[in-house]
């Protein structure tokens, strides 16, 4: 991607492909173009995703008339908030994928009724969860604010 190629040696700005790792690769170029058109740098997107939009929310609720200015204006804030939502949706799908795999394992050893009682859901929901596709989707291996490979 051109935005990643423009980086200079010693530049600590993360590449867009890293900042937007949760995005479908087919959508990446258009997403980056929107941010660049609105003059939203990758490090601001990274920081916003890193705090899951806490700073945006705090500023929004501050009561200040020009609260969006520190983020680059209203368009920038709308794009940043949308990206927080995109990351949250990605992480929700990733968690659902893990749950589907676990329920699939449980159904190998227990009845759907037993699994439903244990999880506090209906028997039908157990089947719905187990049917969810968890083998074909691609997910980020770790959340942006963690630096280790896995948590034990």
Image (cartoon, rainbow, N blue to C red):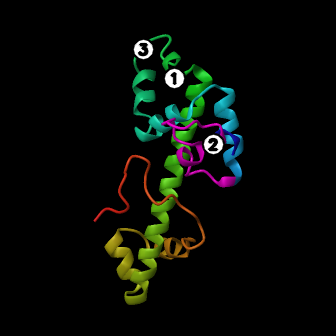
Provide the residue designation for mark 2.
4
Majority SS type along the magenta span = loop
* Left or right placement of residue 56 versus residue 20 in this view: left
Helix, strand or loop under label 2: helix
Helix, strand or loop under label 3: loop
Q: Count the labels in the image.
A: 3
Residue 149: percent from left, percent from top: 38, 61
Q: Nearer the viewer, mark 2 or mark 1?
A: 2
Q: Earlier in the sequence, mark 2 or mark 1?
A: 2
For the residue carrying disc 1, how many other residues have a C-alpha within 10 Å: few (<14), some (14-19), or many (20+)?
many
Residue 127: percent from left, percent from top: 51, 76
Asked whether the beta carbons under mark 2 and mark 3 sit within 8 Å of each other, the answer is no
Residue 114 vertical placement versus 12 (above, below): below
Q: Residue furthest top?
A: 65
Provide the residue designation for mark 3.
63
Q: Nearer the viewer, mark 2 or mark 3?
A: 2
Residue 129: percent from left, percent from top: 50, 71
Asked whether the beta carbons under mark 3 and mark 1 sit within 8 Å of each other, the answer is no
Q: Is 19 in the magenta?
A: yes
For the residue carrying disc 2, how many other residues have a C-alpha within 10 Å: few (<14), some (14-19), or many (20+)?
few
Residue 96 vertical placement versus 50 (above, below): below
Q: For the magenta stretch, what is the residue range?
A: 4-25
Provide the residue designation for mark 1.
71
Question: Could you tell me which quadrant the C terminus lies in?
Answer: bottom left
């Amino acid at each position: 991607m051109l935005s990643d190629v423009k980086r200079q040696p010693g530049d600590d700005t993360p590449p867009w492909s890293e900042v937007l790792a949760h995005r479908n690769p087919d959508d990446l170029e258009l997403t980056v173009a929107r941010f660049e058109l609105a003059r939203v740098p990758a490090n601001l997107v990274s920081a916003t995703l890193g705090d899951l939009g806490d700073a945006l929310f705090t500023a929004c609720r501050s009561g200040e008339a020009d609260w969006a200015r520190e983020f680059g204006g209203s368009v920038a804030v709308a794009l940043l908030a949308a990206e927080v939502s995109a990351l949250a949706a990605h992480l929700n799908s990733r968690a659902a994928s893990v749950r589907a795999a676990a329920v699939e394992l449980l159904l190998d050893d227990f009845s759907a009724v037993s699994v439903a009682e244990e999880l506090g859901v209906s028997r039908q929901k157990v089947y719905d969860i187990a049917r969810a596709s968890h083998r074909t989707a691609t997910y980020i291996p770790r959340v942006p604010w963690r630096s280790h490979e896995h948590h034990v």
